[in-house]
Amino acid sequence: MDPATLIPTPDVIPVHWGWFQLLLLVTFFMHILLMNVMVGTAFIAAVSHFYRDGGSSPATTAISEKLPFAIAFAVNFGVAPLLFLQVLYGHFIYTSSILMAVFWLWIIAMVIAAYYLAYIYKYKYLQLNKGRAILTGLITLLLLLVGFLFSNNITMMLQPETWARYLERPNGLLLNLADPSLWPRYLHFMCSAVAVGGMAIALFFSYKRHKGESGLQPWIRYGCSWFGYATFANFWIGAWFAGSLPRGLITMDSANGVFLLIFLISAIITAVFAVVLALREQVLPACSALLGTLALMVLVRDRLRSAYLQPWFAPDELTVQASYSPLIIFLLFFVFGIALIVWMLRLTWKNLDSEEVSS
Ligand code: HEM
């Protein structure tokens, strides 16, 4: 069977595809950053509780207070890239979502469960004692599972040649496990989450120190060490991921391959800087290098998608039926929404600060 016959006809789009591409990249960057903070801090809290037999530390106390926020933001900032992904690649992502429909729908239940458990962790923190290890372990497990299902869907959408399996097993239980790049790709994401979680901890305690609290250097070092060692491990996982990609997928004969390589090399350089700076406990410069790495890796991932889909589709093939007003209204709401979120965060931060001072 020719896999091309399985790809649905895409819808028309209202403005040039470049707009959606830009919005997809920007909003995905936000999603992945927040997802990393959420998964990474949950993981670090779980490890810390397991090591201390449920015992508490300044880092886990802070994580327990902020984890529900992190989950809420990561999920909400997942919605925007989902919309843009559907606009540009709907005929791929809808199909792969149907192939794994049962798992895909389970994501909703798993995210709700993780969110609920995070609130129990927050509000019952003092009473939980040994239960903290099990609770954070469970939250982490749920979030890791959700990430795994995302990696399955996002890789399966790129490989229409694997879709015909559905004709033999039309039960919505297909995953992309035969793809040798699935595990290294997924582990690359999750290891990056641990690194960013560590950096979030370092940033949090260095903010507190800036506000005048003393004795926080060990916790800044703690966060920086998680970041440094997890990123170091991720160089190897990244190399495994690159080595697992299909041969001939990336060639230097195309502009796409050249851009991918430029982004990748730049990302590796900024990552090395980030690790060195973090291990010297220079939190803000390390954080800037980390954000640069993350942005470049988002671009690498985007070029990789383009290489995978090259035999089947490119977004510039989409038909434009010009209608600019929805985009303008969207952009207005987007800017307004971001301003509102910033205002809300500042308010929450101020309240948390004053609660801590009064307690
Ligand atoms: C809460 C737990 C979540 C975790 C741990 C998580 C993790 C991930 C990971 C690891 C990827 C990258 C997959 C890959 O490229 O291999 C990803 C992509 C994505 N996530 Fe999430 N995610 C979560 C929730 C959500 C939710 C609730 C939404 C939407 C409502 C969402 C929307 C997206 C989208 C659209 C992409 C792909 C964007 C693209 O390919 O350009 N995520 N997520």
Image: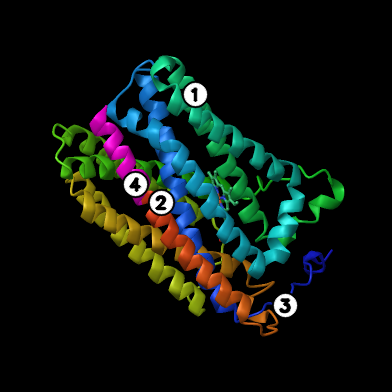
Q: Earlier in the sequence, mark 3 or mark 1?
A: 3
Q: Are marks 3 and 2 in contact (CB under 8 Å)?
A: no
Residue identified by numbered label 4: 231
Q: In the image, what residue type sits under mark 3?
A: Val
- Find residue 344 and name its label: 2
Q: Is residue 17 left or right of residue 219?
A: right
Q: x and y percent of residue 111 in the render?
A: 59, 39
| Quadrant position of the N terminus in the picture | bottom right
Q: What residue is drawn where x is 68% and y is 79%?
A: 318
Secondary structure, mark 3, is loop
Find disc 3 in the rendering and name its residue. 12
**Callout 4: CB less than 8 Å from ligand 1:** no
Residue 212 vertical position relative to residue 318 in the rendered view, above or below:
above
Kindly indicate the quadrant of the structure image that contains residue 353. Answer: top left
User: How far apart are the two marked residues, 3 and 4, measured between alpha carbons?
Assistant: 41 Å
The location of residue 322, given as percent across then percent down, is: 66, 85
* Closer to the eye: label 4 or 1: 1
Residue at image mark 1: 135
Mark 1 beta carbon near ligand 1 (under 8 Å): no
